[in-house]
Each structure stands twice: as C-alpha cells, then as structure tokens.
Image (cartoon, rainbow, N blue to C red):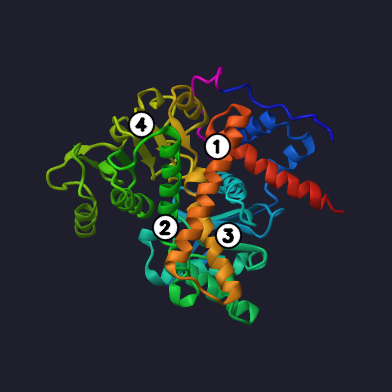
Amino acid sequence: MSTARLPVPADPITTAPVKEDLNSFRIAMRQFDYAAEKCGLEAGLCEVLRRPRRALSLSLPVKMDDGSIRVFEGFRVQHNSARGPCKGGIRYHPNVTFDEVRALATWMTWKCAIVNIPFGGAKGGIVCDPHKLSHNELERLTRRYAYEISPLIGPDKDIPAPDVYTDAQVMAWIMDTYSMTHGSSAPGVVTGKPLFLGGSLGRNEATARGCLFTVRAACKELGINLSGATVAIQGFGNAGSIAAQLLAKDGAKVIAVSDSRAGVLDRAGLNVEELLIFKAKTGSVLGFPSAEVISSEALIELQCDILIPAALENQITMQNAERVKARIVAEAANGPTTPDADLLLHNRGIMVIPDVLANAGGVTVSYFEWVQDLQELFWDEDDVNRRLERVMTKAFADVHATATKYSVELRTGAYILAIDRVANAMRTRGIWP
C-alpha cells in the first residue's frame, strides 16, 4: 500500500496563526488533514475523503401568502456512503452557506463512524428565516425542497433529520412529500418524526443524554465526582436545557446558563426546573430571580468543572482559550472550538470531548428510529436509553484509547478512529468501475 500523503498544514500545536480562519469547511479540512497525517492515510483516499460525494444546490420558488413568488436557496450535500446510507439534518437559517453544509456533512461521516453505526454523512440547509414565514409558507417551502431532493433521499440512500430551526413537523412534511411522490408510505425516509408517524421514544433528549454519557466517562477518567461538580452551559435550547436537567439529576451543580439574549449565574447552583418554567413563560433566562446577569462570552471563562458549549460555532478561539478554566469541555454544539484553541486547551490539560463524539447521541437514536421503522417494531424508552448508553460509553473508550495510542488530543483521536473505519470500508469495497 502506498504511504504517500497529501501536503498538510504544519502542526498547529506549534504554528498557530495570528488570525484564525473561521470558515467551517476549511476548519473541517484542517482537522481531517491533521488526523490523516497522524495515521498515515494514503494520498488517494485522502483525496476522496476531502471531497463530498455529491452536492446539490437548489433554487426554490415558493408562492407566499400574499400571492407573490419568492425564491430561496437550498443545499443537500452527501459526503460519503461507504459504510451505509447517508445521514444528516436539515437546517433553516438566514446564515446557511454551502461551505457550512458541506462541513457539517463531512463531520456527520466521522460522527457516524465514531459511534460505529452503518451510516455515512450528509447535511442540508435552506437560506431563510423561519420566524418570518407563516405556517403555510414554511410548509410550501419544505415540500418544494423535499420534492427537489427526493431523487437523492430514501430509507436506503439518504435519511434527513431535524437540525437548527427544523422539527418533527418539518420531518412529517418531508416524509409525506416523499411518500406521495413514490406511491407508498415511507416512514424510514426521515428521522426525528412525531411518535405517531414512526418516531422513536427518547429521540428528543438523545443529543443531551449522549453528551451526559460522555461527560460521565470523562469524569471517571479524570477522577472527578460528577455529583457536586460545577457546570456552565452556553446555549439553553433543546440540547443545553435537557443537558442541564440530566446533569442536575446526576447531582451536578449547574451554576450558569445562557441563551441568545443573556446568561444567568448563581454560584450556589441554579434551580434548573424553576429556570425552565421561567424561560417557558418569558422566552429567556434573563431576569431569573436571585441570579446574576452574565454574558455568554463571560460564561465560557467561568471557574467550573464542566463547560458545555451548546450554542453556536467558533465560541472558543485563540482569543479566549487561555482564559477557559473548566476541566472538561463537552461540545454539545457543532464546531464550538477552533482547531488552534482545541490544541491550546489540550496543552493546558483541559479535556475537550469533541462534537463528533459528545453530540453523537442524536444520530445514534436516529439510527435506532430508522431500524425501528424498517422492522415496524418499536422499543420502549428505557430500552432506547440503555442502548444509547452502551454505544456512547464504548465510543468514548474507543476514542480515548486511540488518542492515547497516537499521543494526541481526543478530537484527533476521534478523527483517526473514524478515518480508519471509513477508509477500511472503502478499501474493502474498492473503487468501481
């Protein structure tokens, strides 16, 4: 086997750039190149795995409620299918870009391989602000998008799921559109559906619960008692709020959380259940009684045992990584830590549980949902959660063992593990014709 390798960036541990490149796709490629160099991946497979298998750019004309026609831009990217059908969410956001979507598709390939489920990576997105669309406009946009991508998706080809600003209702529209155009009901074409349409129990909590299982494993590795450990959570949406509940049930002390408006801090510990009720009533954590106001930026730098970025990309950078004081950073969000910051945290002895591991609970239970749909046999929630715990705990152990073997941080260890699994599948299947 040839051991020739593509040129890769110099080791970022020693040559961090003065100004970081925050482009999602270039970050994904930098992470891949660094891991591929470490594990000696041959040049041909490097070239294949740096490129999406298929990328679709769409023009989506939609009739608005006032009778006017508006054209939206959409994407669906399939990165790799060597280990099985492609899998990945669809996001609706005004800042969606092609580079972001293909980066997320790439990360999905590694995420599925890390937890060892038989999927490859995909991602989709529409450039829109769903908050400015009526229910009927959102449905028409979704159905138009589903119709345009229907030749590419299917239970054995590519299975979409919810992501930013999409939900079970959006998945139901996609499932119905696909089913109507194919002549039979196909619940397995999407995951994250309503329960009564073939969804899975435990799916809504899966990302946060998977994060909890990796945090437990990390605490065990570092000798931290999770009961009584202090936690700060940036982002109090679905993943962040459920993670707060689950960690509090484990005895952890959630001292700070933030949402898109502001954050709150109580060093004695926030009452998570009361905070959830308060946010449901007011729309924000801001103003929660007996808590100090804190910015999302300041929350990242708090003295705590566990920091959970569960919001946006590029939140921990070379600008603030020196001031992070947590012992564990568990990435519930996608891409919250830049490559240079990641390695700086590692050099400071801070364990970063990378996004491709920490938030893989969502895709794992999506896999469970897909399996249940194909079998037409559904599991109870305890069974789903037990299976998820086994998968996530083993994935952490596999990543930690790989990182130790190659003397790298957990992210590179996760990438090496994933690249090895995908590359082995490609070598065995071969390049045809």
Task: Identify the element where label 1 is drawn.
Answer: helix
Magenta region: 13-26
The vertical placement of 89 against 1, above or below, is below
| Alpha carbon distance from label 4 to label 3 | 44 Å
| Alpha carbon distance from label 3 to label 2 | 20 Å
Q: Which label lies toward us, 3 or 1?
A: 1
Kindly give the residue lying farthest to the bottom in the view shown: 183
Task: Identify the element where label 3 is drawn.
Answer: strand
Residue 190 in view, yes or no: no
Q: Split into 4 quadrants, where in the image is the N terminus?
A: top right
Q: Give the class, few, some or many, for how many residues have Cα within 10 Å of label 2's Cα (few <14, many ≥20).
A: few
Q: Which mark is residue 400?
A: 1
Residue 324: where, in percent of width, then height?
A: 36, 28
The vertical placement of 133 against 404, above or below, is below
Q: Which mark is residue 165?
A: 2
Most frequent secondary structure within the magenta stretch: loop
Position of 166 with respect to 226 (left or right) is right
Q: Give the class, few, some or many, for how many residues have Cα within 10 Å of label 3's Cα (few <14, many ≥20).
A: some
Q: Amino acid at mark 2?
A: Tyr
Q: Which residue is mark 3?
A: 59
Q: Which label lies toward us, 4 or 1?
A: 1
Residue 203: where, in percent of width, then height?
A: 45, 62
Task: Identify the element where label 2 is drawn.
Answer: loop
Question: Does label 2 or label 4 sit earlier along the sequence?
Answer: 2
The vertical placement of 5 against 131, above or below, is above
Q: Give the class, few, some or many, for how many residues have Cα within 10 Å of label 1's Cα (few <14, many ≥20).
A: many
Is residue 24 found inside the magenta-colored segment of the image? yes
